[in-house]
Image (cartoon, helix red, strand yellow):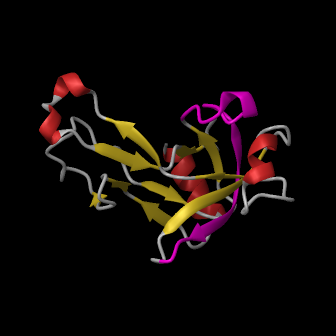
Amino acid sequence: DAHNEEMIEKICTNIRTFYEIDSNDKKIKQNESKHTKKINKPLRLAKNARVMMTKNICVKDGLANGVTGRIVEFVENNNAHISHIIIKCNSPKVGRLHRVSCPHCHGRDTICIIRESDSIDQQDFDVRSRKAIKQFPLRLSWAM
């Protein structure tokens, strides 16, 4: 992680910080949550940062844990929040099916990543307090 932090500071400008959000789209900062055992560190990302996917999204389309690429764009929604992160993968085969239907990636050699739920294990909490935590399934990958 230290190498990744060093590289993002050295290579990138306009570094953005992404906190996990709950099912109400409220930011969850470290040590704030009553419903999770572990809150992940905020993601620090920027255009041109090397990243790796950390979740299988559509294995059939190559959108799988471990796929690497470079951030080319951030897409904002109507509330000026980042809704999609556009990535150019190291392999052009990744995301062919995705590009057919995605308005952000159609005609480009890219894929887009949205926040994904990481549902908390039901056995750890009673159902009333169960929350779905969402974060972009990415991490910096210069150190890989």
Q: Is residue 55 above or below residue 99?
A: above
Magenta-drawn segment: 55-78
Q: Residue, x 65% and y 33% (percent of image)?
A: 58
Q: Is residue 136 left or right of residue 31?
A: right
Q: Residue, x 73% and y 32% (percent of image)?
A: 62
Q: Position of residue 70 (x, y in %)?
A: 71, 52
Residue 6 position by quadrant: bottom right
Residue 49 position by quadrant: bottom right
Indicate whether residue 61 is drawn in magenta. Answer: yes
- Frontmost residue, 94 versus 100: 100
Q: Position of residue 129 (x, y in %)?
A: 15, 41
Question: Image quadrant for the C terminus?
Answer: top right
Q: Position of residue 80 (x, y in %)?
A: 48, 77
Q: Residue, x 66% and y 63% (percent of image)?
A: 11
Indicate whether residue 67 is drawn in magenta. Answer: yes
Q: Is residue 15 left or right of residue 93?
A: left
Q: Is residue 70 above or below residue 48?
A: above
Q: Position of residue 37 (x, y in %)?
A: 21, 35
**Residue situated furthest top in the rendering:** 123
- Frontmost residue, 37 versus 12: 37
Residue 8 position by quadrant: bottom right
